[in-house]
Amino acid sequence: MSIRKSVVRMKSDYEYVATNQQGNAVEIDMYDAPNKKAQSPMDLLLSALGGCSSIDAVLMMKKKRKTIVDFFLEVEGTRNDGIPAFYTHIQMNFVLVSPDATEEEFAKVVTLSVDKYCSVASSIKSEISYTSEVRRP
């Protein structure tokens, strides 16, 4: 079992930076447009799900020796109106541009990617535990 860590540090009330163990940083903000400079945590959830699913799907198609001219994934989340405003539904539209891939084989790859191999999709169903502490300066 491997353990991953991220530290999320406040820059201001609506701006944060998340840094992983290797020092890679992602900016996060909760501003509304036009002041938005980074993704919100809920945007990042969709991006993480899309990134994970995309990588698996593309690698599986390449393993099948299919030509990939272009690939993209549109991810749309519908949020609950109340608090918390969690996603009640996430729709993903995988688009592959390829001269030699079939609809059937790509559909199978997408199903495997989302339902079996994508760690982010599986993590959405995971149990979350937490602790808290106050440190004195």
Image (spheres, grey):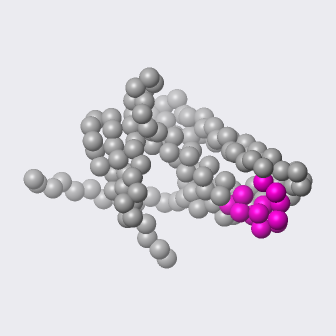
Q: Is residue 102 above or below residue 95?
A: below
Say left or right for 110 vs 10: right
> Residue extending furthest bottom?
1
User: What segment is highlighted magenta in the picture?
Assistant: 56-68
Residue 61 on the magenta span: yes
Residue at 37% in and 55% down: 19
Asked whether residue 108 is in view, the answer is no
Residue at 54% in and 34% down: 80
Q: Is residue 34 above or below residue 113?
A: above
Residue at 39% in and 64% down: 22
Say left or right for 30 vs 126: left
Image coords of residue 8 (percent x, y): 34, 51
Residue 82 on the magenta span: no
Say left or right for 68 vs 33: right
Q: Is residue 105 above or below residue 76?
A: below
Between 89 and 67, which is closer to the camera in this rendering?
67
Image coords of residue 77 (percent x, y): 60, 38
Between 52 and 89, which is closer to the camera in this rendering?
52
Place residue 134 in its image quadrant. Answer: bottom left
Q: Main secondary structure of the magenta part?
A: helix
Residue at 49% in and 36% down: 85
Asked whether residue 37 is in view, the answer is yes
Count up the numbered dots: 0
Between 99 and 37, which is closer to the camera in this rendering?
99
Image coords of residue 127 (percent x, y): 49, 60
